[in-house]
Amino acid sequence: MSALFDPENAIYPFPAKPARLSADEKTFYIEKIKGLLKERNAVMVAHYYTDPEIQALAEETGGCVADSLEMARFGSTHPASTLLVAGVRFMGETAKILSPEKTVLMPTLQAECSLDLGCPIDEFNAFCDAHPDRTVVVYANTSAAVKARADWVVTSSIAVELIDHLDSLGEKIIWAPDRHLGRYVTQKTGADVLCWQGACIVHDEFKTQALLRMKTLYPDAAVLVHPESPQAIVELADAVGSTSQLIQAARQLPHPQMIVATDRGIFYKMQQAVPDKILLEAPTAGEGATCRSCAHCPWMAMNGLKAIAEGLEQGGAQHEIAVDPALREAALLPLNRMLSFAAELKLKVKGNA
Ligand code: SF4
């Protein structure tokens, strides 16, 4: 078996930040994108971590702004023939796997994710082969090839529930790729989980001591934490959850301020949900920090207005997602399992409400 991926020593090809646009250029590209969306019968599917102006444009043009689970659902049920996915590449691949008949375009195919990069298929295959008795559960933040190897795909919004379900069936589990989320679901469920050691470069950088200091500065604030964050950060949380669950928590908690430990792109939708509350970024930069983005994913930041217009206008190999048909077929099974499980869970929650 090959050695496990080592996130501490991983070197990622960080992209350059997109050039800033003037106000006139922004207006130009926004109008252009609106026209191209109509012309192409296309809809925008944007992630919470993209820049606020991208989320606003998705909303204004009838698209969606969501977490990766909802993006997958929306894209597969929307009647548009083209999906413009503003996010990172695995999100475009997921859209294509679920909607092979649609054209799936991205502003750039270079928008990576450290979790995806940190789980190469050859090493992952060797890891799974060494533990054939375990059910393989992979996070949505993986390549089509890794999904094709899995029994289940899962997003952070249903990870605890799925692992709990598999544990109740007596299954032993391989979890990949995020080590912090893997540890979190293991602690929550008590399941027998063997964890791949990937990490998100954004969440991995939240700083415990600085967060403690921030809590003393804002004693009335609640701390909201995404479970891709290190354990010491999760332990300081008033609420832990996926992006959608954190927005929900901001609504439900009585605190007037929220210290938020996830990508700051989420502030756009969170502020809509709690217009009267003050949202504060949890501290990232500090001694030893390796994240250049300071609570903003450098790959999500590649989804600029100019790149979106180019993607819609040019399409082709630079922008269109292609997934090998055999891989697609194999990856569809665990993805559909996830969607069915999520739908059943939703019904159960409704039934209990
Ligand atoms: S924020 Fe982290 S998990 Fe999300 S796309 Fe960026 S690197 Fe991947």
Image (cartoon, rainbow, N blue to C red):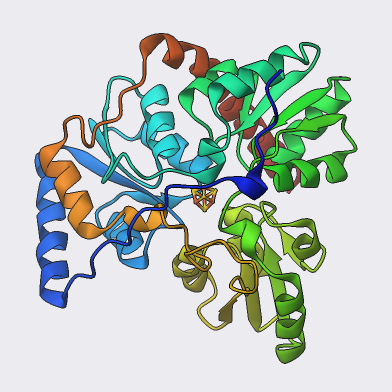
Q: Nearer the viewer, residue 44 or 184?
A: 184
Q: Residue at x 40, y 52 (%)?
A: 299
Q: Residue at x 27, y 61 (%)?
A: 18
Which x, y percent locates residue 147?
55, 23
Q: Nearer the viewer, residue 190 or 145?
A: 145
Q: Quick one: which residue is furthest to the bottom in this view?
A: 217
User: Is residue 56 among the parts visible in the rendering?
Assistant: yes
User: Is residue 336 among the parts visible in the rendering?
Assistant: no
Q: Nearer the viewer, residue 297 or 14?
A: 14
Q: Nearer the viewer, residue 188 or 327?
A: 327
Is residue 76 depicted above or below 280 in this figure? above
Q: How many marks?
A: 0
Q: Residue at x 35, y 60 (%)?
A: 55
Which x, y percent locates residue 163?
77, 32
Instruction: Locate residue 146: give its quadrant.
Output: top right
Instruction: Locate residue 219: give its quadrant.
Output: bottom right
Determine whether, in the image, residue 177 is placed left or right of residue 64: right
Which x, y percent locates residue 313?
11, 43
Which x, y percent locates residue 176?
67, 33
Quadrant of the rendering where the N terminus is positioned: top right
Is residue 162 depicted above or below 23 in this figure? above
Instruction: Locate residue 230: give its quadrant.
Output: bottom right
Determine whether, in the image, residue 104 is placed left or right of residue 294: left
Determine whether, in the image, residue 350 is placed left or right of residue 29: right
